[in-house]
Amino acid sequence: MLEIIFALNSLLVFELPVLKLTESPQPLTLADLVTGKPSEDWSQVLCEVGRFVQRVPVDGEPASFETKAYITYDRSFLYVGFVAYDPQPELIRANLAPRETVTDDDFVSFTLDTFNDQRRGTTFLCTARGIQWDARWTEGSDFDSNYEALWHSDAQLTDFGYVALIKVPFTTLRFESGSDQTWRIMLNRYIARLSEDCFFPEYSQCIEGRLNQAAVVKGIRGIKPGRNIQIVPFGFFRDFSVLDTETASYGGGEENDLGVDAKMIIKDRFVLDATLNPDFSQVESDEPQATVNQRFEVFFPERRPFFLENADFLQTPTNLVFTRRIADPSAGLRLTGKAGNLGVGALVIDDESPGSGRAADDVLRGERAKIGVLRLTQDIGDQSQIGLLATRRDFSDRSNQVLAVDGRYKFHDNWTAVMQSAWSDSSDFDNQNSDGSLVSAYVNFNNRRFNTHSHYIYTSSDFETDLGFLGRTDRPGQQNFHQFIETTFYGGSGSFLYWRPSILLQRFWTPKGDQLDDIVEIESEFEWRGGTELSVEWLMTRDRLLPGQFDALQEPTDFHNHGLAVQIQSKALSSLQFSVEASTGKTTNLVPADGLAPSDGRFETAVVELTWRPISPLRADIAWIFTELEDEASSASVFRNRIAQSKWNWQFSRAFSARVIANYESVAPNSSLTSLTRSRNLNLDVLVRYVINPWTAAYLGYNNNQSNVRLVDNEDGETQVVYDNGLNRDGRQVFFKISYLFQF
């Protein structure tokens, strides 16, 4: 089969188009595009491109609707205008929404590789209503939508479709110094009701990589980002009350917090970020996730502004820099950027959280963790790279250092190999030293019809990374190999698009070679035009739990589990989109009652997610997650876990909105079978936002929390904490947050 694939690939010859730009004597505006064709005055200035080609749903087919893009620049801005034709403009999905809420609507975008290195790019996207979304693209990885940038967009619906204009200041971009620039660009249009992604130039699934297929841009001369110094002061003010279960009393009061973030561009290519008492108040909520009866830590992405720009310069194949480990810093510096083939990422920061909240007589009270990170990468060839990472975290007598080297080698249009080795050196509070190692290597083959991923990971028992995030596959004390194989069978010209079966095989051992876990996951995905998908997954596992992991476990014990999951989702309707998933099977009770060992159980899980948009300014997102575990021997319930979230957003304008979130979670345990405690929690979150850009914004919020915890006075007149079935207020806050961007 691979010989056939290689033979087909050898017949494919891709010649990259070269776009030549001319400096514009005046700014391009949306009014220049609303007729569908710019005036003759622009004919000698604008670079016009068309011939958009589908990637999804039918790779290589011409786009269903015509799209024209017009590119030009002046000394301050790059302009990209789109004329998006549509024979049924009334069906275009164009809602008024908060910034970055764009995935349900029609949109246009482009990705710039300003270093022409085919490794990293910046994407600027706007919907048919002008709503913005931006992200960093990294080859071999994916989009990082936590990236935030300052740029301008506008769009207008017309009788032939819509027009959009994206204007990016050169102060926002990072590029090599020099009079003549050579960049790469890829343009994109998404037609929501058809679930169609089309690109110029053609972005083929037959070749691995995105930026290596982008058009080459020449002709940009005489531009500089300037000094580009940004200063963002902020203020955070709140009045709050919260129940402290340790002291059985309410605490709180008023809190005023002031700080500043600053950014300076050095030699056009490097970004120096500085922060003093940084703005780490998080006004946006994490998405709901079930965390009960989980064997491994649940991942939540970074959202805080200081860490976002060029975050990819600190990343490695194994996540050894997970910045959410830094909870409460008071000051920090971060340098990121690129000079020639050398990429640099450096971070120096402190963290007050390890020493806060400790008892008055604790010797660690008030102590801070000191953190340093250095990452260097060297580009080799077209899309290959080697890298070095060093991290250190010191907290009192505890010290952790990690050194890692890694490389990415692309040796064929479809074949990529990635390798990483890491070593840790740790000393603990009792002066005990330990050192460990990690080795990770994988090979990928990516093609339109066939994908495979072969991955080996070894992590010694003493490997520690205080700043990293290690999941199931790379946790210490194991080695594992997993093999993923996926193929795609495409439909014809009808509504059915494809059937995509896949299989994942995983095996885990101890570093000494003793067998641990086995996983077999078989999945089939089906998709129809309009964004309707069906997936069926069958999972079989053998989990070996070891003495020491559970007190009552006397010897290694194997648990044989299986599960069936079915999910259906659809974006066919413009006003209502949904996803429904149900799963059932056999699993392990990992939270047994004290004195009991883990035992076999049966689970049922249901997840329902709805997005309702009855009118353009209103969006409602509703999520419901239900999980129940029953003891297999007695058929008695071990626990029931329910999570329900309702989020309503009214968008008055592109900048002004109001949002209400109600979140309810409960755990109903059987105390004879599990150590979980009964809990109920209801949280109401109200937020009014005025966001001009990611840094100039004002927030007014109210939060009220209720749980099944209350204070009572006992017979001795002492106050104690009691858990019951009711809902009692245990916290509330009113806050106001404001920030403003000064740019020089």
Image (spheres, helix red, strand yellow):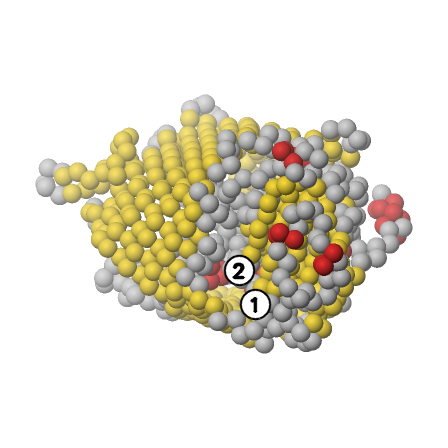
Whether 105 is drawn above or below 481: the answer is: above
The location of residue 433, given as percent across then percent down, is 46, 68
Toward the left, the furthest residue is 716
Between 412 and 102, the one nearer to me in the picture: 102
The location of residue 661, given as percent across then percent down, is 40, 39
Give the residue drawn at x 53%, y 44%: 101
The location of residue 196, given as percent across then percent down, is 69, 40
State how far apart marks 2 and 1 are (Cα).
9 Å
The residue where tag 2 is placed is 150
Crowding at dot 2, Cα within 10 Å, few <14 / some 14-19 / many 20+, comes out as some
Q: In the shown orientation, is residue 655 left or right of residue 486?
A: left
Secondary element at image label 1: loop
Give the residue drawn at x 68%, y 76%: 178
Between 412 and 205, the one nearer to me in the picture: 205
The location of residue 715, given as percent across then percent down, is 10, 37
Q: Type of residue at label 1?
A: Thr
Please identify the quarter of the rendering in which residue 172 is found. Answer: bottom right
Q: In the shown orientation, is residue 181 left or right of residue 693?
A: right
Q: In the shown orientation, is residue 130 left or right of residue 32?
A: left
Give the residue drawn at x 36%, y 65%: 259
Give the residue drawn at x 61%, y 56%: 29
Image label count: 2
Is the C-beta separation of discs 2 and 1 under 8 Å? yes
Please identify the quarter of the rendering in which residue 395 is found. Answer: bottom left
Secondary element at image label 2: loop
Camera sees residue 262:
yes
The residue where tag 1 is placed is 171
Q: Type of residue at label 2?
A: Leu
- Nearer the N terminus, badge 2 or badge 1? 2
Q: Which image quarter holds the N terminus?
A: top right
